[in-house]
Image: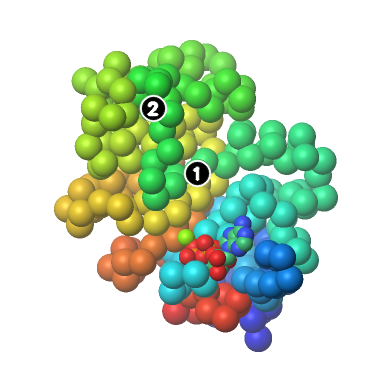
Amino acid sequence: MNNQMPSAEIRRHGSAGEDILQVERLSKTFTLGRTVIPVLRDVSLKVRLGAILAIIGASGSGKTTLLHILGALEKPSGGSVCFQGRDLYGLSAGERAQVRSRKIGFVFQFYHLLPELDLLENVMLPALSGGNAQPAVSPRERALSLLAAVGLSARAQHLPMELSGGEQQRAALARALMNQPELVLADEPTGNLDSVTGEQVLEYLFALTRGEGRTLVLVTHNSAVARRCDRVLELKDGCLQDA
Ligand SMILES: Nc1ncnc2c1ncn2[C@@H]1O[C@H](COP(=O)(O)OP(=O)(O)O)[C@@H](O)[C@H]1O
Ligand SMILES: [Mg+2]
């Protein structure tokens, strides 16, 4: 049951269209000393190009672990992840790192901006490792236009600590989009923000992904947020199911 394509997917998108992600029978266990922690048991999933998918689930259900595996950050114990038709964990570590930095953008709950760099430098950072996806536009110009897109033009020279949580998360959003990633992974991006600020960050997130046809996988605790996505799946007992 759990390795079938969820029915909401079939209803919404039909059989045509391109899958950016194909996940087959994923499992993940962590071992701490003699304790084996089974986190993901059997996760299969297809994500259509341009779709916005929400993943919900109780704390500790494995949402972050799954997102890290989808984003080429953490090797699964079993199963496979195909991203744009390439088996992510069949690649060498170097090739995988290249896919990650060029094609995937991450937004984390606690922003993870580098404290000693100003906002412009933080946003430009992915261009150092990912290369310039838009050779006609310099990384600086692209970073400035992204900062403008999230309403932070006036704060480009400020350090993260000089900004509010919502502003830091908007900068982190700009950074995630720096290399024009096909896939954006967001792990409870509003989890640390009050509801009004969180709503504002989400508007930017939706506008900058849906508006540009990017695929978004969003982990959220908030059911109102999940309802705004094309699909909602729940991680429970190590498996994904329609919510
Ligand atoms: N690196 C790790 N080593 C050992 N256990 C881990 C590790 N990462 C996550 N876990 C365990 O896996 C389970 C799922 O964690 P996580 O993916 O962070 O859940 P969620 O994001 O849904 O709250 C938890 O029980 C957590 O303790
Ligand atoms: Mg988590």
Of 219 and 36, the residue lying toward us? 36
Residue at x 54%, y 23% (from the top left corner): 127
Disc 1 to disc 2, C-alpha distance? 18 Å
Q: Secondary structure at mark 2?
A: loop
Quadrant position of residue 230: bottom left
Crowding at dot 1, Cα within 10 Å, few <14 / some 14-19 / many 20+, comes out as: many
* Residue 89 % position (x, y): 77, 51
Mark number displayed over residue 81: none
Residue at x 54%, y 46% (from the top left corner): 183
Q: Please tell me in which quarter of the rendered image ligand 1 is found.
A: bottom right
* Residue 75 % position (x, y): 72, 54
Give whichever of discs 1 and 2 has the lower sequence position. Answer: 1
Quadrant position of residue 142: top left
Question: Which residue is tagged 2?
Answer: 115
Scheme by which the image is coloured: rainbow
Quadrant position of residue 100: top right
Question: Which residue is tagged 1?
Answer: 106
The answer, for residue 51, to whether it is visible in the render is no
Of 3 and 189, the residue lying toward us? 189
Instruction: Name above or below for residue 178 compared with residue 100.
Output: above
